Amino acid sequence: MESPDYVRISLAAAMSLGYASGRFRRDAKLTGLNLLLTYEDGCVARCSYCGLARDRTLARDKQTFIRVDWRAFPLDDIIERTRRLSDGLLKRACVSMITHRRAFADMNTVIQRVHEGTSLPVSALVSPTMLSQPRAMLAETRDAGADMAGIAVDAAAPEIFDQHRHRGVGGPHRWEQFWECVEVAVDVFGRRKAGVHLIVGLGETEQQMIGSIQRAHDLGADTHLFSFFPETGTALSEWTPPSYGQYRRVQLARAIINAGHGRADDMSFNDAGQVVDFGVEHLDEIIEQGTAFMTSGCPGADGLVACNRPFGNERPSNPFRNYPFAPDVEDIALIRLQLTQGLRS
């Protein structure tokens, strides 16, 4: 059951497509279909936090990825089930490479089949490590049917990246190569058509994370935030997720930067690298709108975020970190309390 004929999908996608039963808390709905390439010999990378890491100490049949089980299903059947959905909830598909010698060609094959077999716009989540000729290869991916490209930089600073993705774990990834790929992706797909994934909670300060958000924005790419969640059997299985305060402040800074309301160098930080002033006058209005605290991801044809990943960063019993829908009045009140959590004077 290997790609390109098989791909893995999240539990949320399995529920939405009828492969698994269950209900989403607060009637959340999945609007983005994520398709993950899969191979018997797995990913060659060793990222300390990742459920796909080669040296993860957990039986393969018990491994999770981004907190939940990802099962493999035939691509043709996924496409057929997607086509049969009558509610129109799915707004985009995303095909994700892993660090594997076959992944680039197989990603393009899957993209083409999804593009031709459904009405969904398709994103590509690429692994720069496997792109020997980034410009030409990303053009191939665009021509296969992808209209957007994502790059999972994940770590917010070079030393954090090196610790968790390169020399610290004996992994193949390089900080400079990932950012160079972001620049090329913007050139190939267009401004705001490339996205940078960043994970809050890998040991960086808020100032470092916000600096990387600004860097991506200045290059013409949007940023998509994830909150670290420990995966059993990985090197960071005992790490604690970032506080809600840390995550909320970064979310708010990201929204300000990506909307063009302000810049990182307009913000003020304390000695711990925590943001204490966002440098905008209408901050209360931005908080009240609530969109800053919703999932950040590639949009659908309507311009709204399609990749909403319900419960991808927390257990369903915990408060949301990324809201998969617009926060209500009670949610905003909770968010206001969370924004000051852990903030040093």
Image (cartoon, rainbow, N blue to C red):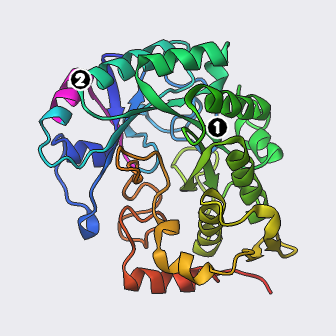
In the image, which disc is placed on residue 116? none
Question: Is any atom of residue 2 visible in this view?
Answer: no
In the depicted view, which residue is nearer to us: 89 or 169?
89
For label 2, the residue is 117
Give 321 or 228, whichever is nearer the viewer. Answer: 321
Q: Is residue 85 above or below residue 122?
A: below
Residue 126 percent location from the top left of the image? 55, 28
Q: Which residue is painted at 60% across and 39% down in the image? A: 191
| Residue type highlighted by circle 2 | Gly
Which span of residues is magenta-colored? 68-81
* Residue 86, image x, y percentages: 11, 44
- Please state if 200 lies on the left or on the right of 163 as rendered: left
Mark whose residue sits in front, 2 or 1? 2
Q: CA distance from mark 2 to mark 1?
A: 34 Å
Q: For the N terminus, give its image quadrant.
A: top left
Image disc number at residue 47:
1
Pointer 1: residues within 10 angstroms few (<14), some, or many (20+)? many
Q: Position of residue 91 (x, y in %)?
A: 31, 44
